[in-house]
Image (cartoon, rainbow, N blue to C red):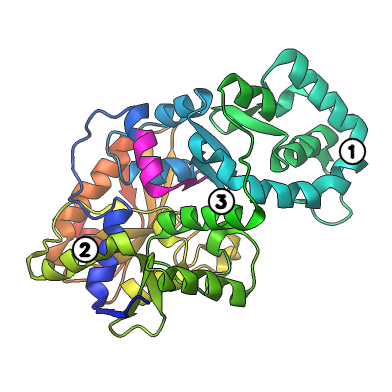
Amino acid sequence: MTTLLRINKAAVRRLLLHTQGLLARWPAEARHSGPDQVIELIRSLGCVQIDPVAAVTGNQHLVLGARDPGYTADSLNTLLSDHKVFEYFANAACVIPIEDYTLFEPVRARLRERLAPSLQGLEKTVQHVLQRLKEEGPLPSRAFRAVERVSGYWDSADVPKTKDTTLALNLLLDSAVIRVVARQGNERYFHMTESELQQQGLPMKEDMDVFAQRQALLDKYIHAYRVVDARDPRLGWLKSTAAERRADIAARVSDGRMIPLKVEDVATPYYIRAEDEDLLLHMEKEEPHYDASGPVRFLPPLDNLLWRRERIVDLFDFHYKWEIYTPEVKRTYGYYAMPILHGDRLIGRMDPRLDRKTGVLTVRLLSMEETAPPVEEWITDFREGLQFFASMHGARSISIEKTVPKELKKLLKSI
């Protein structure tokens, strides 16, 4: 039985940031990066969440760009078209290394069973879509002409707004009969899953029993999260009861694969992999020598670090809510508020918009936490970080509309 490890909050916070690729000093200058570097980054993270909302660019690009200063979207698109990654449900819709394809068979099996009646209800359209993909190869949604409008699961009830072919494509995609094999911007190109995997010599699934499949996927989840809360309903990325989640973690503690933590001033029990213990203890030992200086980073709303919001409260004393679904009049920080990471602390939020026609990055609101360090400790790093962020995403100038506190705007006037 593994014994409880008592540890301070800062050490756990830095372990999490280190394993998320967010602790090392952030370079102010870009370095060359290509598909090989990006696939290694995705492997280290486990997966990266996809989201098409583009206040600046898609979530997946912001996640990777916050860790790799030489990142470009072309690298991720190349990995997808070269079948080095695939898109499917992990934390949500994610980009995942292709070698992990078989691990997600339990998720695919559950969705196939759930969506089978819907596919049967669209059988004629489904067969038409599949036949065209078999005959013509990868196609986007716009290549299919709708016969009728239907109610997609994303539509309001009883309001048929969606092309029947679009619904068929999405149901087939969620059932893993087809998959995304290329992207041009936000446009997806679909093809038959089985034929694509066979061409790459990859299996559709492994010969494992249900329990072994579940445990393999839980291992993948633990690798992605690193500092684990057994209360997380998404634990293992499969439906499970609270009792099952506790039992899964308890079994790993019992056989020494995981270590329970008692984090100073934190009530929640957290767990880490046994192989991360030495790194955690090193973080604690080096705490007096930690240097937080360096350009800030801006994290998108669906960044891997933010997946478990309760963990962010516990370890960073930072409360975050993505206000995209909050009515505009009730928003506090803005539609796309991005947490600002300085060293090992989240010190504020920035709500940006990028106008690609004019090349202007507009910061609608820059709001700093009341608990942020004195401004002189981070203002230079903030300037460098914002200028780098703007340049990385193609902006030629920056406009800041409002700041909290108000006097901060004067300090950033010349940016």
* Magenta-highlighted residues: 38-50
Mark in front: 3 vs 2: 2
Residue matched to label 3: 90
Residue matched to label 2: 278
Label 1 or label 3, whichever comes before in sequence order: 3
Q: Main secondary structure of the magenta part?
A: helix
Q: Pointer 2 and pointer 1: residues touching (CB < 8 Å)? A: no
Q: Is residue 148 shown in magenta?
A: no
Q: Amino acid at mark 1?
A: Leu
In the picture shown, does residue 230 fall above or below 350?
Answer: below
SS class, disc 2: helix
Location of the N terminus by quadrant is bottom left
In the picture shown, does residue 255 fall above or below 391?
Answer: below
Badge 2 local density, few (<14 within 10 Å), some, or many (20+)? few
* Numbered badge on residue 392: none
In the picture shown, does residue 375 fall above or below 130?
Answer: below
Q: Amino acid at mark 2?
A: Asp
